[in-house]
Structure formats: C-alpha cells, structure tokens
Amino acid sequence: MPPRTRAVFLALIAIAAAVATAAVTILLTSERQVGGQAAQVGGAFALTDQDGKRVTEADFRGRYMLIFFGFTNCPDVCPMTLQRIADALDAVPALKERLTPVLITVDPERDTPAVMKEYVGFFGPEFRGLTGTQAEIDAVLKAYKVYAKKVPLPDSALGYTMDHGGLIYLYGPDGAFVTAYDPSLDVTALAARLKENVN
Ligand code: NI
C-alpha cells in the first residue's frame, strides 16, 4: 500500500472506531436515562381512601401496590382495565395475599371517598380507591408522570370528562418501583406478568 493510501486507510479506521465508540456511549447513556426515569416515577403521596381515612404510601409497606389512575365516570378504558386487573387476580388468587390493587382518581372534584367506595366495590373487596384535594391529586399525577386533563362536554349532563393516560404501576413491598404494564394487556398476559414480578 503506497504511504498516502495507507494514511487515508488508517484515518478511515480511526473515524470508524470513533463512530462506534460514540454509538456505544449514546446507547449506554440512553439506557441509563430510561432506568433513571423509571426509578423516579412515583414516590410519596398523602391521599384519602374510600373510607375517608388519610393514607400515605407508607401505609402500603409490606405489600405490593398495583396502581392505576382513572375516574369513576370513565365510560370505557378505566372500568375495562380495572375488570382485567380483578380477573387477573382471580386467576392467580395467591397474588391477593401479596398485592393491593389501587385506583387513584384523576377527577377528585366528583370522585369523593363515598363515590370511590361504591365504584371500587364493583371490582372486588381488595381494591382501594384513593382521592384527595385537587392539589394533592395534581402532586401525585406529577410524581407518577400521568397526563390528565378536563375536557368540557357541553351537550352532556356530565358537564365534563377527563382525558387521561397512564400505565399500571407495580411497586414492591419496600415502596420501590418494580415495573409498569400496558393497560391494554389481556387478563392472561397480565396474570402471567404479575406472577413473574410478584414474589
Ligand atoms: Ni379512563
């Protein structure tokens, strides 16, 4: 190889190596960010349960918490998701010994403790329903990175609905984030994932 060609060749190898190193660095960094973000989801809260009792995340220590955000006037996604959670727990009854399913409302204006009590009662006695002041709920939504927005319904007696997102979050007995599930998982898949993650 003539010296000039050789120099170009070596330069190309050096560039390729630099690109590869940069790619690996970007990959590692993004993975760390995803892991870091997950660890930051959730945390402390102070709310009121369906019996009107004040509760914090510390009251759930020693048990897994399966948290879903929704509201009692939700026409479809919330009740269907809660029913799938109830069915998954019925499919693997041992889960009920270790885990408490929790609905946190995104609509505290209408979802009083009494309303929450009747609603979570439809899905099973193990369900807890948490509400609070608007400020308390706003703080929880922010901590759990859940999107929720009031949408006026001028032609409906309801007056408004809530546009909202959110996954199903699993927290461990020590309060640490374990994982999050897509709320559209079917009963079999959700039961299998829970069995895998709860021990
Ligand atoms: Ni909903």
Image (spheres, rainbow, N blue to C red):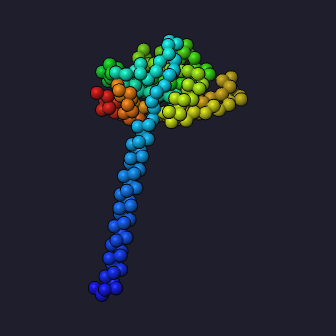
Q: Quadrant of the C terminus?
A: top left
Residue 125 spot, x, y in % from top left: 42, 14
Q: Taking the image as drawn, is residue 76 in sight? A: no
The residue that appears at 35% across and 63% down in the rendered structure is 20
Question: Residue 6 placed where, x, y %?
Answer: 31, 82
Which residue is outermost to the right? 154
Looking at this view, name the residue that lies furthest to the bottom. Answer: 2
The residue at 50%/16% (across/down) is: 54
Question: In this picture, is 145 found above or below 131?
Answer: below
Q: State the residue in front, 106 or 152.
A: 106
Instruction: Report x, y in % for residue 83.
Output: 45, 24
The answer to whether 124 appears left or right of 112 in the picture is left
Residue at 66% x, 23% y: name it: 158
Give the vertical position of 164 relative to 124 (above or below).
below
Q: Is residue 157 above or below residue 23?
A: above
Q: Is residue 70 above or below residue 27?
A: above
Q: Is residue 157 left or right of residue 97?
A: right
Count every numbered label the image shows and give the total.
0
Q: Quadrant of residue 24?
A: bottom left
> At which x and y percent is residue 109?
62, 22
Choose between 155 and 135: the one closer to the eye.
Answer: 135
Can see residue 24? yes
Can you say which quadrant of the picture contains the N terminus?
A: bottom left
Q: Which residue is at 55% across, 21% downward?
A: 132
Q: Is residue 94 left or right of residue 34?
A: left
Corner quadrant of residue 107: top right
